[in-house]
Image (cartoon, grey):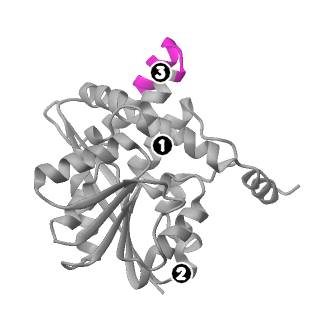
Amino acid sequence: MPASDKTVSISAQLDFKSITGRQQQTWATGDFNAIAMTIVPVAEAVVAAVNPHAGARVLDVACGSGNTALVAARRFCEVTGIDFVPALVERGRQRATAEGVTVDFREGDAQALPFANGTFDAVFSTFGVMFAPNQEMAAYELLRVCKPGGRIGMANWMPTEWGGDFSRTIAKYAPPPAGLKPALRWGTEEGLKELLGSGTSAIRTERKTVTMYYRSIDQAIEIFRRYFGPMARAFQAIDAAGQDALRSDVATLFDRYNRATDGTLAMECAYLQVVATKN
């Protein structure tokens, strides 16, 4: 059997429901909000690129604790945020209350959005939908709930630079299910065309960077280990020697992208910003 046919065969046999359940448990580990607060500029940039006006109906898919939803709400858009981690949905509600803005935060799956066709003027996902195991269904849902002529704004890690290196480092110790298409596919123009191209009239991409600031590399590692679900789970799944190796690999990676020269960490992370226009 050719390699391509074998991949298709394995993919067809994947139990996406079970994989989604395991992913939900992974992302529920720790508190992703501790990481999200360091990348707020990404949400601000993608909302600015899509440029929804006041009164527009906006959806933030796999919203986490609500970075992008809150940015849109500050524009007086009518915003809904949806995520499959209850604690993050609740954190989003708390943040909205603290900021005095209105967002309808709900629990739900990016692969089965509970909205009618063409409900939203703009649909966003910031480092979210890209991790859905059934990529074709997730892409279909983004397009389905977006109005004709509406825009889909995304921020996705790329196979190159920080995002790719970090994903591969974690996968070395906690491999993804065999046959699952890589999340980093969403960070390539080819992948975006395969996933969104048939339902869009234009896909505009731009390489951008966000800098994460920490007091030191050691502090960053401890925060990621405690609060970032995939890394926390990787540490839990391996023995002491493996944990030492993973910590060393992450330290090397963080140092590679460190732009600070004063002993702190200013980690430059490149990503792909996407604005797609629905047919």
Q: Quadrant of the N terminus?
A: bottom right
Residue 100 point in image, percent of width and height = 11, 57
Please say whether residue 192 is visible from this viewpoint.
Answer: yes
User: Which stretch appears magenta?
Assistant: 237-248
In this view, which residue lies farthest toward the top? 240
Q: CA distance from mark 3 to mark 1?
A: 16 Å
- What SS does tag 2 mark? helix
Q: How many other residues sit within 10 Å of disc 2, few (<14), some (14-19) or many (≥20)?
A: some
**Kind of residue at disc 1:** Ser
Mark in the foreground, 3 or 1: 1
Residue 105 occupies which quadrant of the picture?
Answer: bottom left
Q: Nearer the viewer, residue 136 or 98?
A: 98
Numbered mark located on residue 199 in the image = 2
Locate residue 132 relative to residue 39 in the image: left or right: right
The image shows residue 4, relative to residue 252, as above or below, that is: below
Numbered mark located on residue 167 in the image = 1
- What SS does tag 3 mark? helix
Q: CA distance from mark 1 to mark 2?
A: 29 Å
**Kind of residue at disc 2:** Gly
Residue 108 point in image, percent of width and height = 45, 54
- What SS does tag 1 mark? helix
The image shows residue 277, relative to residue 105, as above or below, that is: below
Say which residue appears at 56% left-offset and 32% top-offset.
Answer: 174
Magenta stretch: includes residue 238: yes
Locate residue 216 relative to residue 184 in the image: left or right: left
Numbered mark located on residue 245 in the image = 3
**Kind of residue at disc 3:** Ala
Residue 161 point in image, percent of width and height = 41, 50
Contact check, label 3 and label 1, Cβ < 8 Å: no
